[in-house]
Image: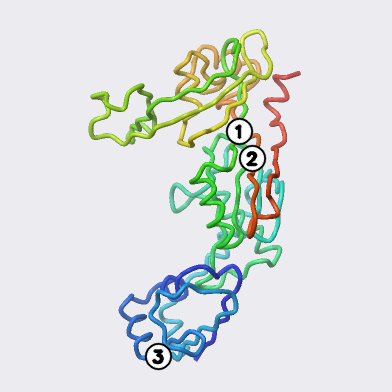
Amino acid sequence: MQQIEISKTEAGQRLDKFLHKYMPLAPSSFFYKMLRKKNITLNGKKAEGKEKLIERDILSLYLSDETIERFQEKESRLWEYEKAYKELKGIQVIYEDEHLVIMNKPAGILSQKAAMEDVSLNEWLNGYLLQKKETGQEPGGYKPSVCNRLDRNTPGLVIGAKTLAGSQEVSSLLLERRIGKFYRMFARGHIEKEDTLEGYLVKDETANKVFLVKKESSEVLEGKKVSCIKTRYYPIRRYSDRTLTEAELITGKSHQIRIHMADIGHPLLGDYKYGDRGWNERYKKQYGISSQLLYACRLEFPRLEGTLKSVSERVFEAPLPAEFQKLME
């Protein structure tokens, strides 16, 4: 028999989902049978599995240790988190509280895994919290994770959630587009004024590339996945052949800024997928720039109460990347 007291990080999820995480090798039929026979109870009472868990709930498992162990994961993932924390270099923690960690991700690091063998910021976050002894990573417990993603070669601010409540709140804010997400870039040519760009993004899955169309009803969209995109941008400082530019993602889709800026004749410096290869090559030869000069420079939170009150109306900024510093001197 085992008793589990629900912690703050585990609260907010359904009982049946918690059980599936605690014993991931067990079938759903097993849990429903154990709940029906009161071999699994919540706060000493019969439960259906749909109940939402709250902090300090007591879950009692009237099962043998052998049965529980048989249904639990056989290999711990702790080594993976520890490995990521040791191997991934240059990640900075910009802000941290009981629910959130805001990190500055360097270029070259994935936000989340693309393949099983990958090591990403997500694993680094868990390794970081493990070395602080802030998470036990017990079976069934909430696994801290990143809430917004950046391309591998785009550095900047990424929000990580330490608790389920924090993850749910940030996800809701991102879905409602209430967190301001700002980027800076070097774009080709001279940008003279602020503007807002709109269009429809169509993804070519085989080439991992997107293209832009102006009308959703266009024949080219038939049978393809389409996303409406909107970007606001404005110049910060003009140089001989480029403009330091800031953009706000009003929507947030993969490659959105890069494709929008290329479409208006101001592709990003270092962008070989959508940009000007000849221009890029000149800068690569002189400055060693081999990927797009774009970074997630700022996050602006709205007025908030409750779980995320500590970040209410706060603004977080990423340090200026070295490549930008070099071209601004």
Q: Nearer the viewer, residue 160 or 199?
A: 199
Cα separation between marks 1 and 2: 6 Å
Q: Which residue is mark 3?
A: 38
Where is 55 relative to 66, above or below? above
The CA span between labels 2 and 3 is: 48 Å
Disc with the residue nearer the chain's start (3 vs 1): 3
Indicate the secondary structure of the residue bearing disc 3: loop
Vertical placement of residue 111 versus 68, above or below: above
Query: Viewer-proximal residue, 168 or 267?
Result: 168
For residue 164, what is the image quadrant? Answer: bottom right
In the image shown, does 147 or 249 lie closer to the viewer? 249
7 relative position to 278: left or right: right
Question: How busy is the neighbourhood of tag 1: few (under 14 within 10 Å), some, or many (20 plus)?
Answer: many
* Residue 323, numbered circle: none
Badge 3, how many Cα within 10 Å: few under 14, some, many 20+? some
Q: Amino acid at mark 3?
A: Lys
Q: Which residue is mark 2?
A: 299
Q: CA distance from mark 3 to mark 1?
A: 52 Å
Look at the numbered disc 2 and give the secondary structure of its residue.
strand
Q: Position of residue 226 (x, y in %)?
A: 33, 34
Residue position marked by numbered label 1 in the rendering: 182
Which residue type carries mark 1?
Phe
- Going from N to C along the chain, the mark reached first, 1 or 2, is 1
> Which amino acid, by three-letter code, is at mark 2?
Leu
Determine whether label 1 and label 2 are within 8 Å by CB: yes
Helix, strand, or loop for circle 1? Answer: strand
Establish if 83 lies above or below 204: below
